[in-house]
Each structure stands twice: as structure tokens, then as C-alpha cells.
Image: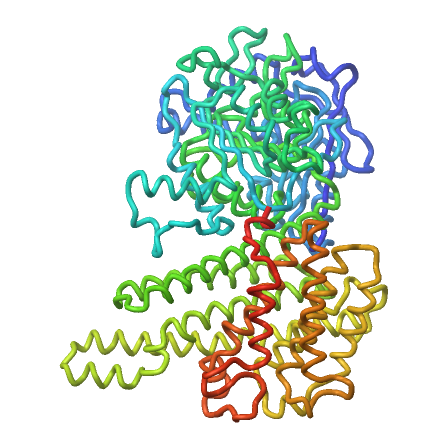
Amino acid sequence: MKRMPSVKLEYLRHGPPHNQLLSPLTNYLGVCGQNEAASVHVPYEHAQFLNRLRRLDYEGGIEKGRESRQLEIEDVSRHVTKLLNEVHGLNASLSTACTENENPLVHLRLTLSAAELSVLPFELAKSPRGGPGTENDWLLLQPEAPVTLTRRMRGVVHANGRLSGAPKILFIYADPNGWGLPLRQHIACLMDALEPWCEPIEGEALYDNKQQEGSAYASALRKRFDPHLTILPNATLWDVEEACRHQQFTHVHILAHGTTIKDQPGEPIGLALHHERDPSQPDVVDGVRFALALRPTKQAQWRVADQGGHEAPALVTVAACRSGHQGNVMFCTGSSFVHEMHRAGFPLVVGSQFPLTFGGSVMMLKMMLHYLLEGQDPRLLLYDLRRDLHALFPESHDWASIIAYDALPDQLGDSLKEVRYTQASQAINVAMVHIDKLAQATLKLPNLDPEAKEQIMNLMRRYVARIESAADQLRKTSHDNTSTRMWGIFASAMKRKAEALFYMHGHLNEDMRSSDTFTLEKMALVDESPEEVARAKAERKRVKEEKTACIHALKTAQRYYERAISINLGADGIGGARESAPHWIIVQALSLQVVQRPKGWQKNTNWDMWRSAHWIGELDLGVESIMSRIWAHSSLAELYLLLLAYQEDDLPTGLDHTIARMKVLEHAEKMRDLATSVDANLALYSTQRQFARYHVWWNKKSFLDFFHPDQIPSADEAWFCPDGTDQGPLEKMAYTISQKVLPKIDPKDFNQ
């Protein structure tokens, strides 16, 4: 990933951070990077400026006073921009960062050590003189050199949040006053974003479950989304703490109303939750109390299932009006709700410094989830979010209302790359689980009517598209072309895509696959309408394209595995130690070569590659890491399995089918036994699934037809028995390992 350039801007003054009001008499220091400090003054008295901000609160409705509100925005923007212009080197730093870096986006990181300055809406600033864009452009919207802005507090260190692993979201909803909130829209956004990671459940409808209604539909949804989404309706603070005592969350989203805390000096803004003793009454909670509920005590952490420690959620989004509004610093530190959450150590906290429209809150949640669940840079997200809010909600200033506090590490790219790897792999796994269940259900229901069959085909196409989308997203966001692991994941994704397409047209849709011409002739004989004939032709064309795509995906997977081999073994001239053991990559490349049966494949096998994988696998059997040994046994078992695809006369000296069968069983059993001492569910699942492919996919005559439609298997071919009366030696052994030796693993046991 290209590193995002960062420009650091800080405003300081003498004395403690609180107990000071805005005043033209106060002298501040503005510092940008290593440039000379500049003396800066604000043009407002504190009460005067708060009165100006109140004019941006949509009093009387969003349409009332729109013209005067826009004039106020322009005036506030002019003064905030003046504060930027007075800082030495800021305009040059922004321009240099925009022109001299490969990453087009510049991160402006604003640090405010004086609490009263947080009330200033720096997000409304226009481009400083000599900076990117013109002086009439909003700094955070101008397209010439994109800039994104986040705030942070001096003294807050980089926070460790839970980014990797399956997404787990806590949604907190409260409306004790009955003022109304866009609850349904927010739940719809959450479900839409999480759907790629939600596996089908037992008893779920075979087709699109949106056709279900009532309690059955609601129950199915809860079961599907429960592993990834916890909803606290009519939430109290105790509900929040109880949820966080027993679970870890990657993201927290809050939908509530922001309101003043009447019983605190200065009446700061808090969130209106339900009162524990009387849920019909509000309990207005400030950021300090809420942060304590989200970060339970160490004793509570011990009760969390993950014994690796209790990490803070990576993201907290607050869809509440004025959650980023600074309180009255005359009576307290004046910190806003999101400021206090940031100070408590949450890596990224996003709220609003002005009232947020319902539509704006929905868009904020939708974009936040889709970007961050896919491992996108949150700073890019903020830039795109502001631009979309400005374009789609021109009657509001939601784009400037968004305020973000970050404690993200400088080397954020490395963490995000790991998230992309993990999330893409899990999304592909889940899509394949859906396809498997559809395939299994269809085999149990052979007499499906055409409409039902079409529904299944469309669902399969949806999941195939999801597999391809996950792989494409990984390719687009990764700039590391020397990563063995990256190419391995690309190859795996393409193999899974080919498998899904084969399920669709290899045996589930046999009539479409083999009888296209007959179908059209039959329609003509019974005088079908031209529309029906045209539809059949279009379907035939689509089937042909998807069959071609299946072949292309499998061949692409082989090329990607070969690319990974060349990187790992140094064929590209890339120095350094091995990134990871390449035995599994070589085995997969050999496997795809065998199953595609190119002309002369038995006589032209590269046995040096087979020996290399075998040698490296044997080396890994002697390492200390149990997981490395488990993966080595998996690769060695498959290496020996491949020998059963050959006639014994074609095997290297010293190898035969008897030795191969013995070694396959030996390594599979050792893998299974070692897996009892560690969490090896992913390794077991991957190996079981790979061996199953040999007897449920690659042994099918219809699969051979895909690649060699005119080739008739010879009677002495060891791969399978062409008359269908018995299984070939490879198919028998693959079935034994996948169905009898290795335990069945549910993907949800490792997608966490």
C-alpha cells in the first residue's frame, strides 16, 4: 500500500488545557511540522462565537433560514481559514505533500492542546493561500489535491483496536423521549454490510429468504446475523457494559439523540439512553461514562471468550446530533462526547459537531461499514464521505458536521493489508458455503420446476460475483506484487470461483449444459413465442459464457500459483529469506496441472517440482511450530495423492501406488492427531475440502468435458473408471481422507 503523506498542524497556548475562553487577546502558537511557530489570534469572544454556532443548528427546520445559514457558514469559514493562513509553512507543506507523493490523498492531522479551540469548526476551512485548490474551494472537498482531516488530543498514544477477524458489531439504539430515529434504515445498512460474512443456517429457505414473512423470517435473520451483530434496543448504560463484559467487538455504532446534561455545570452534550430504573425516562450519558462501559474492568475481561486480551473496538460511530460539540470550558474541560471517547483510547471515533440529518446519518453508517469492513483506509473514507454528503445533501452542511478523532498508528497500511487478506478470505469462504448448500439442496430435489431452478442459478451467480469482488478488491488495494501470500490468495479465489461455476453448469444445470440446440428446436415445434425463443437463446449464451469463465478461472488460478512459486523461489531475482513455506503453493500448481489433463500430461510432469515440494514439506516436519507441521502433513498427503492419477509406469523410480496410498493415510492421520493440541480448524477444513474436490468435482466426466469435450477417457486411465462402475484409485483415496479420516469442520469455527 502506498503510504499516505501526513501534515501535522498543532495549536498551543500556555497553561492547562481548560479554564480558558476564546478571546482576541489570547496568544496561541500555530506549528506545522518542523516549521517556525507562528503567533495566532482568534477574532471572536467565546460567547459571541457560540451564538454564531447556534445559527447552524437548523432551528425551525432544515429549510427555514437556509440562506442566512449559508452566509453564516461562509463567515465562520473565512475566520477559520485565516487561522490556517497564519501558520508558517502549512500551505507549502500541503502543496508539497500533494505533489511529491504517490498517494494522492494527504492526511492533515490537527492537534489542539487548548480545549476552547475545539469549538472551532476547522472542517469548514477553505484552501489556504498557496495551498491546493483555489481560495474559494473548501479545503476538504477540493478535487485538485485531496485532503482529509482528523483531530487528536496531545498525549493520546496510538491505540490498539480489534481490526482483524470476523466483523462483530455492537449496535446501540435509544430514544427514551420518543423523538424518532431512522432505526430501520440503520439496521438495513448493518445487515447489508455484514451479509458477505454471514453463513447460511440450518432450516433457512432454499431460495432467497426475503420471500419469507413474519416471525420465521425474523428468526432466520437473527440466527444468521447473531455471530456478527449484537443489537441493544432501548439501551441502558448497564446493557452496554454487560454486552462488553462478555464479548469483544470490532465496531460500535450508536444511534441516539444528543442533548444537554442538565445536572452538570456548563450543561455539556451527552447521549440520551434509557434510564436503568425507569426505561421511560432518559439517562443522559457523557463520554467519560460511556467509555467506561465500553472498556470493562480487567475482571470483566477475564470472562471474554477470547483469552488473548480485551481490545478496544477499532471504530466507534456516533449518529447523534452535536456529539462532537464542545462544552462550556468555564465549568469543566469542556470536552465533547467524541473527544472523551478518543481520550479513552479508541482508535477512531466519528461523530457530528452540528445536528446531523437522518439521511446523512444513514450515509455515514453505510460508507463507514463498507469501507472499514473491507480494510480500506479510514482517512480515505472520511474524504469520500464528505464529498458524497456535500453532493447528495446540498440543503444541509452534514459534510462539515462530520468530526473524526484518530489515534491511528503511522504504519496503518500494514495493519490494513492484514485486514484485507483476512476479510477477503472469509468472504470467499462464506460465499462457497452458500454455494455448497445450494448445490446439496438441489441434488436432494432433482425435480425442481424451471422457476425454482432459475432462482437457484441467480443465487449462485450472486455468490460467484461476491467471490470475484473479494478477489478484485484485494488486487486493487494491494500494491505489493512481491508477496507470495497475496498471489496465493488470488489463486485460491480463482479456484473457488471456478468451482462455483462448475456447480452451476457441470451437473446442477445439465439440461442447459448439454441440450441447447434441442431446446430451441423443441420450442419451434410447439410454436413457442419469439420472446421465449429469444430468452432461451440469451440463456444459452450466458451458460456458454459462464462455462468459459470456469475454464478461464481455473487456468488463471494455475498461473497465479506459478507466479507465487517464481517469487518464493527467487526466479524474479527477489532476495531475502523465504516469506513462507512454498510447499503448499507448489502442490496446488501441480494439482491444477493434473486435474486439467493437458495433452501428454502424464509424460510431461515436472517431477523436480514434486521433489522440491516434498523436500520442503519434510523439512517443515522438523520445525518446532505445530501449525507448520500440520500444514506440512497436509501438503505431503496431497503430493502422494497426486501419484494415484498416474499409471505406475509413469511414476519416478521408487514410487508406486501402494507406497502412495500408505503415505497419504500416514500424513492425513498425523495431521489429524496433531490438530488435537492446537486450534487447527482452518487447516483441517482446507485440507478436507481440497481432498473432497477430487471426488465431487474433478472426477466428473462433465468436468473433463469442460476442457476436452472431444476426448474420450481411455480404459486404462488411472484417474477414474470411465464406465462409472467403480471408483479409480485416486477418487477412492480422496473420498477416504475427506469423509472418514479428517473430521468435518464447520467454517464458522474458524471465521472468527
In percent of width and height, residue 560 lies at 65, 72
Q: Nearer the viewer, residue 336 or 34?
A: 336
- Place residue 572 in its image quadrant: bottom right
Q: How is the image coloured?
A: rainbow
Asked whether residue 671 is in view, the answer is: yes
- Number of dots carrying numbers: 0
Q: Nearer the viewer, residue 349 or 110?
A: 349
Asked whether residue 390 is in view, the answer is: no
* Residue drawn where x is 72% and y is 70% of the image: 636
* Residue drawn where x is 72% and y is 56% of the image: 674
Left or right: 59 as drawn, with respect to 690: left
Q: Nearer the viewer, residue 656 or 94?
A: 656
Q: Nearer the viewer, residue 383 or 648?
A: 648
In percent of width and height, residue 419 lies at 64, 50
In percent of width and height, residue 666 lies at 71, 68
* Residue drawn where x is 55% and y is 49% of the image: 748
Above or below: residue 515 compared with residue 187: below
> In the rendered image, which quarter contains the N terminus?
bottom right
- Place residue 661 in its image quadrant: bottom right
* Residue drawn where x is 62% and y is 83% of the image: 645
- Place residue 332 in its image quadrant: top right
In percent of width and height, residue 659 lies at 72, 79
